[in-house]
Amino acid sequence: IFSRHLFTMATQETLEKLSKLTKRWEKSTPRPCSRAAFLDQVQNLRDALERAGDLGLYALTALVKAYGLEEVDCVEGLEWVRSKVKETGLAVDAWYYADLVKAYCVNGNHGEKLAELQREISGITYSAELLRVLCRAYGKCQNHKQQREGLNALWMARRSVGYDNHPDLTCNNFINAFAAAGDREMTLEAYRDYRWTFIGLSCALNCRIIEFTEAMELLKNDLLDKPERLDEVTKPKDRVLMINNLLSRPSTNLSNMCDGLDLLPQLKVRLDTVTLGVIVGFLQGKGAFEPLRHLAQQLLGTGPVFKEPLGDLGEYRQLLERIHTLGMLDLPREPCLKLILEEFRHSERLSEFEEILACMEESKKEECRPSVATYTSYASFLANTDPNVTKLRKVEKSIESSNRGMDSPALTALLDGYIEALSREDVYRLWDTLVLSESKLMNVIVLKSFIRAFGKFSDRPKVDEVLQLCGKQRIRKDSAFLAALIKVLGKRFSDFEEINRLRENEPILSRSTAVYNA
């Protein structure tokens, strides 16, 4: 007994090391080491467990978690664990399989493996967690035959879990999985099968596969007609979320939008900025730009007016009257105006965007004045449609003189504009601003833009400076950064030796389509 106790203590120490190694990888940005070095450490701990002769369920599950980490994705390791289970005849449980499914699906959906695991799992009792993990996995499965068969098998097995183990979450996953599979009838059946929960109803309202009128009926029958649920089960923010889910489906027409908004008073909630965002997105989708200009003028109030007179509202008059009645003018003005500006940006209508922005700048009301985020949006819009250096410098000056000053998104948008305008002077000035900011403005997105900029001007020493800064500030290189770097190294400098070195040292390169294409 004493020798066995010592042996268990040694195993416990090894498992603790494995757990710490796994957690450090999960929480570290950048990763603490390369993928190869991480797998070497896992291999050493696995060898220690094998030598101790204690590869039990706890140890094997810990190895599954390590092999299934993001950016590790070691299928060979997972296959080794499964072969050990078969070899030893170890009795495994639902938790082991839940971790195994998550591990296989972390960086891609292995449809064949899911079907294989499903056959193995059939002999054990499901846990709620395993049911949810499999639902999510099958919801993303690209093979529709495997998806349908897997979901049907899960649906038959759901009763074994029981209703008391987080039924709302289990219901939620079934609704989403069947909706992803394009099965409308089973989506509705999944919603009705479990006892009623707010999460289930909200999830059903969000499913595009359920028609608007059908979703409206669900909302009326299961919430509005049951006052005890309205006041006791849901909070105002929950009910706003439901309405937003209902209104934001692609098939929504003008009549649906008006009917949906009429439910706000019945649900005892007021219009909020998110709902207004859904409405202005709907107007933009319909090409209704005059109503958007009317909304902007109402938000600006008395003061600056548009140079071009407002046009007729036509069939949208009733919708705008409803929005006004529901309290649009009680909302914060600048965020609402920004929502409208974004729709003009998405439609590439620069003149209307600039017309509203000019009125915001001229407004005497502080609440209407443009924020840094609004100027960032404008700079991004200019970069993509009209990289005018004079306009970009004016935006930069407005940002610098604002209360918040320059931030990373604003710097990136301005830089992209100056790159498109081929303004070397402004690009190098922004680089000096970044370096002097002492990491305040630094992130991988900003540095990626500078890689692109210095590549455009064929300045290799500056590209190297960006990489040195990346290392100094411990900024983790993502796939977009590496793709931009590889394009610059290859196209501008023909440095294939450096590209090969990156292939050996950057684990993300083997799993990123963007990097592979570059």
Image: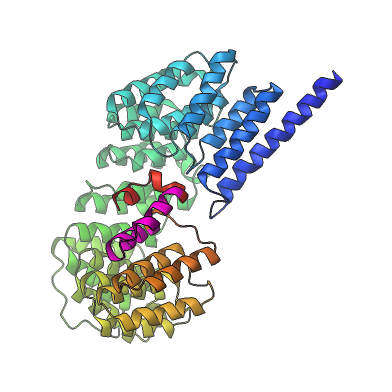
Q: Residue visible at 23% across and 79% down?
A: 355
One can see residue 391 in this view? yes
One can see residue 271 in this view? no
Q: Where is residue 300 in the image (x, y as percent from the top left)?
A: 31, 78
- How many numbered marks are there? 0
Magenta region, residue range: 481-504
Reply yes or no: does residue 503 show up in magenta.
Answer: yes
Judging depth in this view, the residue of 348 and 305 nearest the camera is: 348
Quarter residue 365 falls in:
bottom left
| Vertical placement of residue 217 versus 338, above or below | above
Q: Residue visible at 46% across and 40% down?
A: 198
Q: Position of residue 215 (x, y in %)?
A: 31, 39
Q: Residue visible at 48% across and 40% down?
A: 229
Describe residue 487's horizontal placement relative to residue 330 as left or right: left
Quarter residue 341 falls in:
bottom left
Describe residue 87's horizontal placement relative to residue 136 as left or right: right
Q: Position of residue 261 (x, y in %)?
A: 31, 54
The scheme the figure's colours follow is: rainbow
Describe residue 129's horizontal placement relative to residue 265 as left or right: right
| Vertical placement of residue 285 versus 89, above or below | below
Q: Considering the image in quadrants, where does the N terminus appear? A: top right
| Vertical placement of residue 144 versus 443, above or below | above
Judging depth in this view, the residue of 466 and 365 nearest the camera is: 466
Q: Where is residue 268 in the image (x, y as percent from the top left)?
A: 43, 53
Judging depth in this view, the residue of 277 and 255 nearest the camera is: 277
Q: Which residue lies furthest to the front in this view?
A: 497
Q: Is the magenta stretch mostly helix, strand or loop?
A: helix
Judging depth in this view, the residue of 233 and 168 nearest the camera is: 168
